[in-house]
Image (tube, coloured by chain):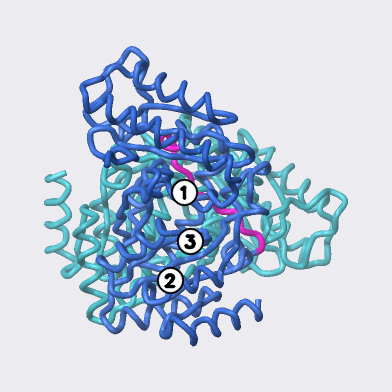
Chain colours: A blue, B cyan
Amino acid sequence: MRARKEAAADADSASYAGMQTVEDVAEFRRILTEARAKGRRIGFVPTMGALHEGHLALVREAKKHGDYVCVSIFVNPTQFGPNEDFARYPRTLEADSASLGGLADCIFAPNAEAIYPEDDQTRVRVGALAEPLCGPFRPGHFEGVCTVVTKLFAIVGPCVAVFGRKDYQQLAVLRRVVQDLFLPVEMVGVPIVREKDGLALSSRNRYLSEEERARALVIPRALTSAVNAFNAGERNVSVLREGVRASIAASTDRIDYVELTHPDTLQILGASERVLERSLFAVACHIGKTRLIDNVVLGEDPAPIRQS
Amino acid sequence: MRARKEAAADADSASYAGMQTVEDVAEFRRILTEARAKGRRIGFVPTMGALHEGHLALVREAKKHGDYVCVSIFVNPTQFGPNEDFARYPRTLEADSASLGGLADCIFAPNAEAIYPEDDQTRVRVGALAEPLCGPFRPGHFEGVCTVVTKLFAIVGPCVAVFGRKDYQQLAVLRRVVQDLFLPVEMVGVPIVREKDGLALSSRNRYLSEEERARALVIPRALTSAVNAFNAGERNVSVLREGVRASIAASTDRIDYVELTHPDTLQILGASERVLERSLFAVACHIGKTRLIDNVVLGEDPAPIRQS
């Protein structure tokens, strides 16, 4: 703990003067109260660290909406299933701090005991929106997400909170929490940031071997084909869905889902339905030990791979 | 809606000038923001209306902690089971308004759609504390309570919230929600208010016929015997519990539970255990169609019936 604080402090004095790194809930609140007293509007980006350009896009977006930007870095144990990658999830606080220098005003990096104190037993969950897509494959995941984000929102207080659309279902679920619980938070979603070859940025991409990363490209390629087909007039759910499913099945090790859904309710479109003029195309699959998700909103988003 | 507003407004101008009655969430928030801007500290008493002297004691307590006191009146559908008394629960807004005149600054009386908007699907629940006592007899009850109070707390914002100890388990559960979710709320519990003959005040007492009310007195009498036995040195869980259980069984129609528990964890004490120096003695039973609860903390509370 001490070593971590000092490392952060050192880094702080080095390349990103003025950014504070805080572990303690009460101290974080005090800093926010002080910022508010100066009339600053809080921008908040909750993350699990292992930051990449996708996260930095969220921080830049937060800067547009607020004039004091906090990033939380907390690998939330309750959103991982027992067979998931909680233990090996990358923890890279020093590198994260360095990459936030000049972008964020404050990093909140609590330990697990601070967020889940002894005897903690309150949980927040969402119903129908958490049921399709990742729901059945990650039981308890969205409850963990809703719980930790409700805690973080209560600690931060009124703010503009920024989330990436790669975790599309998470964003939809959290918008619902904010609305249903009347939380004083303005929710902002940011488009997926992709590598030049189309792969959606993810902290989990660093798990991939070179060979696995090459195979992962099937996901943006398949979604690109779907966008192109949709833009060329294809409206048959089955045709669009099975095309993507077949491509992804050929190059990945296991598919969790390949689905077309309503973009707001996330209700899965049936094979005999026509696709909506705005439809979510969402994919989750495994390559080796790594689970990857990706999505595109047909009728709204550009193709993951741009024609040059 | 209009009729209700006008009735409240009429009453307002009559006997309790200055007290506002608000239905709308946004307007309620605006009023609270205005009060805070004047430096006022918010005292908040969430109720389901049908106010009695017990509620008024909560409002007086809120007045000690805050200088702008709000009372919410909302019969929360999600905390009633399908076979419970939601439909017949007394709705007495005009009488409630009159009794709050001069005590409260604002009544928040939203309708169900305002608190549970269309597509509402977020729920808040507590684990172990919600499991014993009323837990098994009222499935979903505490989830409904936690959900509505989390909503109300988010609407009200930072405040001192006052609850009665008659709903002892509810208070314990809600303290847990506030602590676990980091809500900016100071929780205050107020001792049970009783009639002169010892019956704990309850909005449900008005369901009782004269004969039923007479039978209900067995509850404070039995708890009084237990307090007296405890104060005389009895520490045997079984002796204390079975004494109360036998008395109550003789005069009521159905017992849900008669239990001694740890006063904080609410874990039920086993028959072979010695009673703790502070132990909760909690009772729930039915008289006719009416469910009554009562409790006393041995080693802390006075006997429900005072010796004259």
- Comparing marks 1 and 3, which lies closer to the viewer? 3
In this rendered view, identify the residue nearer to me: A43 or A194.
A194
User: Residue, x 26% and y 70% (percent of image)?
Assistant: B102
Residue identifier under label 1: B145
Q: Is residue A126 magenta?
A: yes
Q: Amino acid at mark 2?
A: Leu
Residue identifier under label 2: A100
Query: Badge 1: few (under 14), some or many (20 or more) residues near its Cα, within 10 Å?
Result: many
Query: Magenta region: which residues?
Result: A118-130
Point out residue B74 in the picture as x, y percentages from the top left corner.
33, 49
Point out residue B301 in the picture as x, y percentages from the top left corner.
64, 67
State whether residue B19 appears in this view: yes
Residue identifier under label 3: A51
Q: How many marks?
A: 3
Q: Is residue A143 above or below residue A33?
A: above
User: Residue, x 72% and y 55% (percent of image)?
Assistant: B261
Q: Amino acid at mark 1?
A: Val
Question: Which chain does the numbered disc 2 sit on?
Answer: A
In this rendered view, identify the residue nearer to me: A148 or A96.
A96
Q: Amino acid at mark 3?
A: Leu
